[in-house]
Amino acid sequence: MRIKTDIRLFFLVLMLVNASFAQQNKITAEATEVERTLSFRDIPNLKEPYINTTPEKRNDGIKVGALKLKSSDREAIIKVSQEIFDGKYGNYDALLISHKNRLVFESYYKKGRIDLPHGQASAVKAYTSLVLGRAIQLGYLSMEDLNKPLIHFLKDLNPKKFTRGAEKITLHKALTMHGGLTIDSEKWKEVENDSIRLKGQGLVQTLLEYSTPITDESQTYLYGNFNPMIVMTVIDAVVPGTVEDFIKNEFLDKLGITDYKWSKHVSGLPEAGWRASIMPRDMIKFGHLVQNKGKLNGKQFISATYLEKATSSIVRPAIDWMPKNYLYGYFWYYTPVNVGNKTYDATLAWGGGGQRVIVVEELDLTIIINGYDRDDDKIMKPIFEVVIPAFAKL
């Protein structure tokens, strides 16, 4: 009897030791104190992928759930996650999936951390578009204003120095990358770092002085080309206070986004097209705004009319690096996704290196990707062929 008791005690101790060891060696994606002080480049890669099909509730306002799919589809998504960690699709740090407004899958790889903001490149353009939609919802602009000459809103400009055709630039044109500015690159280098001349509306003043005449022929799709900063300048001109305060107080704070970085342009205004850092889980909130037609907690937060326009297929960009089936709205991309005999509409915020907010409204689905890969199109293959089809079956 004593022997049996000793054996039971031995196994009990062994189980406790193993449980303690497992807890100490539990895979975590939380940043260490040292990692919080490092630049993104110096953050060490995770030794193992962090994959969670029942994400934990955190103090960030994100509702959580479980990945309730057919077992084969669930395992296929986990397999994709392992392949991402193994580098099959390039350098990626996070894949998150929200279904019916609940985070149901959360994974981190390489430099990804659950509690560190991740760098955003051109995805910031889409966030700027949402800020504009917020300004429209609050009545500082109207949908009709989108087709008015942009200079109408900028009262500090001197029109006597404008190039011919300056009045052809509207918010609609700028938001679809059709501003039509043509500026000699060497000439622009002389002033591009002049924070005094370019301060505030001085940026637009200088652009309209330096550009050759703006014509119907020059107003073709040209990615970037100062268009995002032109839009940011107009937002700054129409909202109370500064656009920086507006973004914080009327946009990010209300979304519960407090741990972020948003760099400033040489003009002193927030960057409109890149150089921000956002938590991966907070990126979901941008997707939910699109998924829920601009509503936040049941109330209209972004103008629904604007958002429908912004995420629609307004123009077909003639540009080599963009997939042929991608169309462009107001700094948001649109593409059809074929699943079997059915086609779903997907809208995307896309930043170079692989930051994406992907929304399939019909499926109540938001997908977040973060990466730093130069060839950032490979990751979309498993998204279109594995992840989205899994939820289309529900």
Image (cartoon, rainbow, N blue to C red):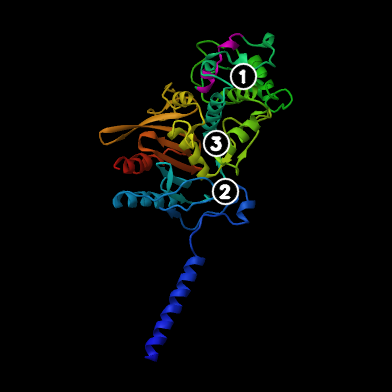
User: In the picture shown, does residue 271 fall above or below 32?
Assistant: above
Q: Main secondary structure of the magenta part?
A: helix
Q: Which mark is residue 121?
A: 3
Q: Which mark is residue 116?
A: 2
Q: Which mark is residue 184?
A: 1
Q: CA distance from mark 2 to mark 3?
A: 16 Å
The picture places residue 149, in percent across and down from the top left corner, at 57, 13
Residue 137 visible within the image:
yes
Q: Residues within 10 Å of mark 1 (few under 14, many from 20)?
A: few
For this orientation, the residue located farthest to the right is 196
Q: Residues within 10 Å of mark 3 (few under 14, many from 20)?
A: many
Question: Magenta stretch?
Answer: 164-175
User: In the picture shown, does residue 180 fall above or below 296?
Assistant: above
Q: Residues within 10 Å of mark 2 (few under 14, many from 20)?
A: many
- Image point (49%, 43%), residue name: 370
Mark whose residue sits in front, 2 or 3: 2
Residue 378 visible within the image:
no
- Image point (63%, 25%), residue name: 239
For this orientation, the residue located farthest to the front is 298
What amino acid does circle 1 point to? Asp
The picture places residue 324, in percent across and down from the top left corner, at 38, 28
Magenta stretch: residue 229 in it? no
